[in-house]
Amino acid sequence: MSRIQVPKIPSSELTPEPLYYSRRTWLSLVGLSGISAFIAPSAAAQDRWPQGKQGPYDTDEKPSTFREITTYNNFYEFGTDKSDPAAYSGDFKPKPWTVRIDGHVKKEADVQLEDLLKPFAVEDRIYRMRCVEGWSMVIPWRGIPLASILKRVEPTSKARYVAFQTVLRPEEMPGQRRRVLDWPYVEGLRLDEALHPLTFMATGLYGRDLPNQNGAPFRLVVPWKYGFKSIKSIVRMTLTATEPPTTWNLSAPDEYGFYSNVNPEVDHPRWSQKTERRIGEFGKRKTLMLNGYAGLVEGLYAGMDLKKHY
Ligand SMILES: Nc1nc2c(c(=O)[nH]1)N[C@H]1C(S)=C(S)[C@@H](COP(=O)(O)O)O[C@H]1N2
Ligand SMILES: [Mo]
């Protein structure tokens, strides 16, 4: 994704993703999908999963397979190839896990993840996700709205943004032993974006705990923004008065802004954002304004020039 890095990122990272055919695609192409359960045991999870709109925030699009979601990942802490997070996250220990919430809040928290989550009912949400590189998936997340957590810590009137931080554990995360990015990975949202009912903290997918490669045990999910905003393996959230720094903006400020809303009308400087490829499909789909969530979130950006605030 980024430009000038030390060591240099392989050239495969510098262009939108190449064609990639999942096993499911090959099998359905040759009419053998009926036997996929024999070849890929994980096929069973998604086949039993409720499909389509169950709640007001679900997409009715068909979820990507468990295999697609857990083998084609961006998680640079485990390497820069799409297959690296699944291959090299085996030593990562997502339990026990402590989360700190501080900054402009009335009730600071420094708690075990289970205790943080205990008061809230877990929900399942099927969201479209769109990476800035030009691919997309549909993911059945499990978790709780971020607003539930934020309301509990009581942001003060000074709080205008939320800064998020990924864990720093080079012993367990081989990618952090190289200076590919400035570690730890950081991200941020405006407070009204963070409080929006679509903004979700995932602890699972397909009804199971999050696999390490998807950001175990606790990651952000913001479906109307490019995927890199959805920061993984979070250990700290800080309510701030000013716009917090974000990793990809620090790495390449002319390519990645603070907002990073999915927007087919604002091209990346090196490629168009008008279309995308759904993992598992051959052709291209049109990228939708705010990733199809415009009706729910465009009010957040009323009066803003989204070409300037990219
Ligand atoms: N800590 C951290 N979070 C991260 C990333 C990363 O490299 N490190 N990659 C981002 C990018 S570019 C994308 S597209 C999504 C991918 O999430 P997924 O692998 O669960 O689909 O995670 C985002 N969160
Ligand atoms: Mo991404």
Image (cartoon, rainbow, N blue to C red):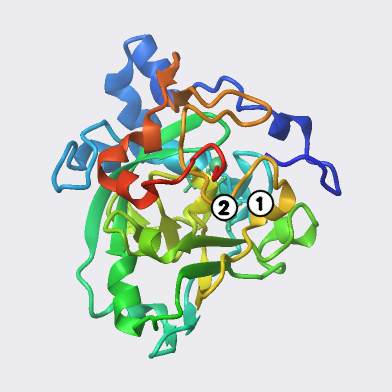
Taking the spot 45% from the left edge, 71% from the top edge, the residue there is: 160
Taking the spot 22% from the left edge, 44% from the top edge, the residue there is: 58
Per the image, label 2 sits on a secondary structure element best described as loop
Q: Residue furthest top?
A: 30
- Mark 1 Cα shell of 10 Å, populated few (<14), some (14-19), many (≥20): some
Is residue 87 shown left or right of residue 205? Answer: right
- Could you say which is closer to the camera, residue 292 or residue 234? 292
Amino acid type, callout 1: Asn
Residue 206 shows in this picture:
yes
Residue 131, percent from left and from top:
51, 38
- Could you say which is closer to the camera, residue 195 or residue 35? 195
- Could you say which is closer to the camera, residue 169 or residue 269? 269
First-in-chain label (2 vs 1): 1
Q: Residue furthest left?
A: 54
Q: Is residue 118 above or below residue 38?
A: below
Q: Is residue 62 above or below residue 216?
A: above
Indicate the quadrant containing the N terminus: top left, top right, bottom left or bottom right. Answer: top right
| Label at residue 249 | 1
Amino acid type, callout 2: Phe
Residue 233, percent from left and from top:
52, 64
- Could you say which is closer to the camera, residue 52 or residue 292? 292
- Mark 2–mark 1 contact, CB under 8 Å? yes
Is residue 199 shown left or right of residue 159? Answer: left
C-alpha distance separating marks 2 and 1: 7 Å
Instruction: State yes or no: Cβ of the residue under disc 2 lies below 8 Å from any atom of ligand 1.
Output: no
| Label at residue 258 | 2
- Mark 2 Cα shell of 10 Å, populated few (<14), some (14-19), many (≥20): many
Taking the spot 51% from the left edge, 40% from the top edge, the residue there is: 71
